Amino acid sequence: MLSLTKELENKLRYKGKEYKLDLAFDVVLRWYELLEDPEMSSAEKLMTAFRMFLPGVETTDGNFIVEAVEHISKYVAETPYGNYDDEIADDTSDEDPIKYYSYQQDAGIIYASFLQDYGIDLIDQQGKLHWDKFRALLDGLSDKTPFQKVVQIRMTDTSKLEGEELNHMIELQDYYQLDSMRSVKNQNQGMNDFFNALVQTSK
């Protein structure tokens, strides 16, 4: 999570040694996509994630690999508000607010919104823009951006509408319907399930 008094998260300590992390936003988003890959085993996903986040680090220490990826996963899921997508190790609450966006499904409107509000081309920023900065900028997008407009459409309570306005909103919500399995909340829960499965197989 972004702090104005601390350096960006870019190192990991393990057994007294520091390792450089790659937490560019596109690397983190690839990790989210990796979790959904049905053709990769858990072990393959774990090793791929380790190499992505700690490029150039070679190790045969299984505990190091698991602890490193789990620590990073918890870190990238943190949020400064609500605390409803940061507790991936204990996501049992039925009261968590719905997440009205997906990093993958909404990639186009996120890209367009960053360009519109900040003049930032996210394609050009791959490998450069830190995850913490990306998240802060995403949260700060103005209401005039495509991203915020789509989020507002998804959040609209149609029970309070009628007539033409109701029909129009239903059409918009149908068009911009979010694949719940790719929502941020469900992807973070997927990380929780992933590490729970690893623990079970290691017993």
Image (cartoon, helix red, strand yellow):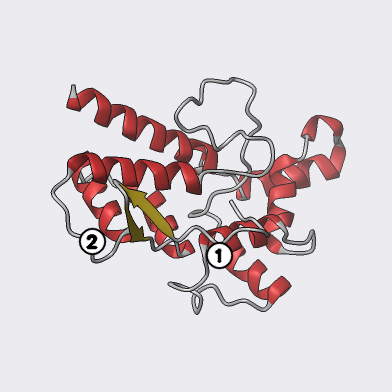
Q: In which quarter of the image is residue 122?
A: bottom right
The percent coordinates of residue 53 (x first, y second) are 34, 58
Residue 36 in sight in this render: no
Q: Which amino acid does label 1 sit on?
A: Gly
Q: In this view, does 118 lie above or below 80?
A: below
User: What residue is disc 1 on?
Assistant: 108
Disc number at residue 139?
A: none
Where residue 178 appears, as percent x and y from the top left, is 56, 44
Which residue is drawn at the image coordinates 74% and 56% (left, top)? 149
In the rendered image, the vertical position of residue 175 relative to residue 180, given as above or below: below
Residue at 30% x, 52% y: name it: 49
Q: Position of residue 124 (x, y in %)?
A: 50, 79
Q: Is residue 155 visible?
A: yes
Q: Which callout, 1 or 2, points at the residue further toward the start of the chain?
A: 2
Q: What residue type is labelled 2?
A: Val
Q: Where is residue 194 in the image (x, y as percent from the top left)?
A: 33, 34
Nearer mark to the viewer, of 1 and 2: 2
Which is more toward the observer, 202 or 64? 64
Residue at image mark 2 = 57
